[in-house]
Image (cartoon, grey):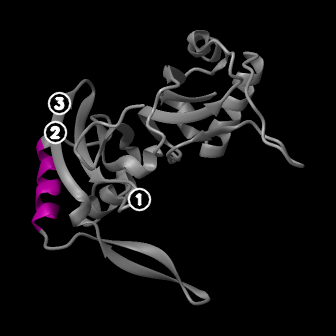
Amino acid sequence: MQLRLAFKKMGMIKFISHLDTIRVFTRAIQRAEIPVLWSAGFNPHQKLSIAQPLSVGMESEFEVLDLEVEDDYDIGVLKEAINRELPEGLEVTDVTKDFDPTSVFERIRKTEYRLFFPSKFYPEASVLKDVVEEAMKREEILVGRRKKHKKKRIIVQEDIKPGILSMRWAEEEDGVALYAVLQAGGYGNLRPDRFLKGVFETSDIDIDYIQIRRMKSWDGENREVQL
């Protein structure tokens, strides 16, 4: 039986890698004694995958994990069973066996990110807004990307401005947040770190202390992507 799970990744656990996140779930499933199916071959592993790799240091409100278990397993107890074994910061929020078989990555066209500027490290909101507004006035917002050319790796400048779809600011406790909707998915993907680099590169704003959180995504028909 194939299942799809939604989970959050928040707090200090954001500093573990994508592969380590898979390992954490693998061990939690074993400890919870969930009858997961295993692959065949010389190096068997749980039939488990996470749709969108999340960059180290980034939080997320909605991540998707696909899992295959024995057909007679009661999925009603799965969420609580896994959550008991997961470390702080990882939490399964939903489980279903009725889902769109199309991969989540293929469905996504845009994603909203919360970019939080703690007041401890950053100037008042008006200064930040002015920097962003000035950047958006430029005809192009260029960011370097390493690409392989023949046997060499070269840096090419790419215009990220078309991938910036919308932005809004919000005053929040201990700082200000910029909610940016960026192009995402297999048809073009603008990572939030590249967005920040392009927008703030010509300013004296240090982007290292900005806290990034993936909030939600939409498909090509502007519907929020769910399980």
Q: Which residue is mark 1?
A: 186
Which residue is painted at 56% across and 31% down in the image? 13
Q: Amino acid at mark 3?
A: Glu
Query: Residue furthest toward the bottom?
Result: 150
Q: Is residue 7 visible?
A: yes
Horizontal side of residue 212 vs 5, given as left or right = left
**Callout 2: helix, strand or loop?**
strand
* Comes first in the chain, label 1 or label 2: 2
Query: x, y (%) of residue 135?
Result: 16, 63
Q: Which mark is residue 77?
A: none
Nearer the observer, disc 3 or disc 2? 2
CA gap, disc 1 to disc 3? 33 Å
Q: Amino acid at mark 1?
A: Gly
Q: Which residues are magenta?
A: 126-137
Callout 2: few (<14), some (14-19), or many (20+) C-alpha neighbours within 10 Å?
some
Q: Which residue is mark 2?
A: 169
Frontmost residue, 148 versus 205: 148
Q: Which residue is mark 3?
A: 171
Query: x, y (%) of residue 227?
Result: 42, 31
Which residue is painted at 36% across and 48% down in the image? 108
**Callout 1: helix, strand or loop?**
loop
**Callout 3: helix, strand or loop?**
strand
Q: Are marks 3 and 2 in contact (CB under 8 Å)?
A: yes
Which residue is painted at 66% across and 44% down in the image? 19
